[in-house]
Amino acid sequence: MDEVVWERPEPLARAAPTPLSRARIVETACALADEGGLEAVSLRKVAAALGAGPMRLYGYLDTKEELLDLMTDAVYGEIPLPDPDTEGVAALRALAHGCRAAVQRHEWFADLIGGRPGLGPNALAYLEASLAAAAGPGPIEDAMITVFTVHSYVTGAVRSEIRERRLISDTGLDEEGWQRAAGPYLQRMFDTGRYPTLLRTARDAVHPDGDAVFAAGLERVLSGLSLS
């Protein structure tokens, strides 16, 4: 792998109508993404928001992919890391809730996490804290699987939440409105008798809010872990 952007020095500061820094570029890109999603982010758009020519940004990064990596790492830096002496399950719980809170502030973050781990210093610190929380006397592979399991739950849950938020924005229907619109069709399906458990769920289940659903699901995942 070639030198990564975090190892590359920034250009020397020089007098200019619009002073630039890598941190300022990333902050501006994150603000654009917060307002308009990742489609609102390009080197040209970031440069325009900064009042600078696009070519000036190439002294600080080479590609849009590097910019997205920097943005991702900036958000990882917002997630509080547990104290090193925090009990393992409690630390994993705190990291999971911290990741979800970061997605709620920056919904585009959900599109960039998962898959290969980030290589930025903040992403590595998050992964280190996760592995340290999961590590026990057994093989380190056990900790890897634990972290993968918890992180898979978190990324799946937050992406589902963000998908719902975007559907509300696109359709104008919240969950209750969607249920009313789909109700007649679903009732016809239930009347066939082929979906008794689904009918029972729709009729009898309590539907808690997103915070409660996430927390309850996380506890089910954590309760199945063996960190001893």
Image: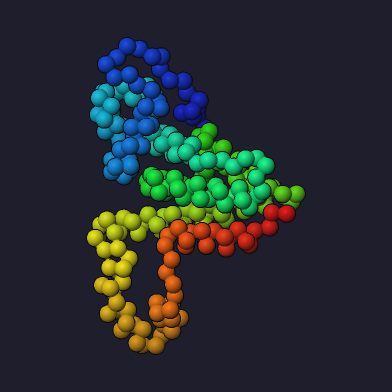
Q: Is residue 40 above or below residue 186?
A: above
**Residue at the right extreme?**
137
Choose between 56 and 204: the one closer to the eye: 204
Quarter of the image with the C terminus in it? bottom right
Q: Is residue 16 above or below residue 181?
A: above
Q: Position of residue 137 (x, y in %)?
A: 75, 49
Which color scheme is applied?
rainbow
Choose between 174 and 32: the one closer to the eye: 174
Q: Position of residue 8 (x, y in %)?
A: 47, 23
Residue 109 in sight here: yes
What's the residue at 52%, 62% (across, down)?
216
Q: How many marks?
A: 0
Q: Position of residue 155 (x, y in %)?
A: 47, 53
Drawn side of residue 131 relative to residue 22, left or right:
right
Q: Quadrant of residue 40?
A: top left
What's the residue at 26%, 63% (across, down)?
173
Choose between 214 and 160: the one closer to the eye: 214
**Residue at the top extreme?**
15
What's the residue at 49%, 47% (across, down)?
99
Q: Quadrant of residue 70?
A: top left
Residue 63 in sight here: no
Choose between 201 and 151: the one closer to the eye: 201
What's the residue at 66%, 48% (across, down)?
87
Drawn side of residue 86 relative to residue 199, left or right:
right
Q: Is residue 120 above or below residue 107?
A: above
Q: Position of residue 94 (x, y in %)?
A: 56, 48
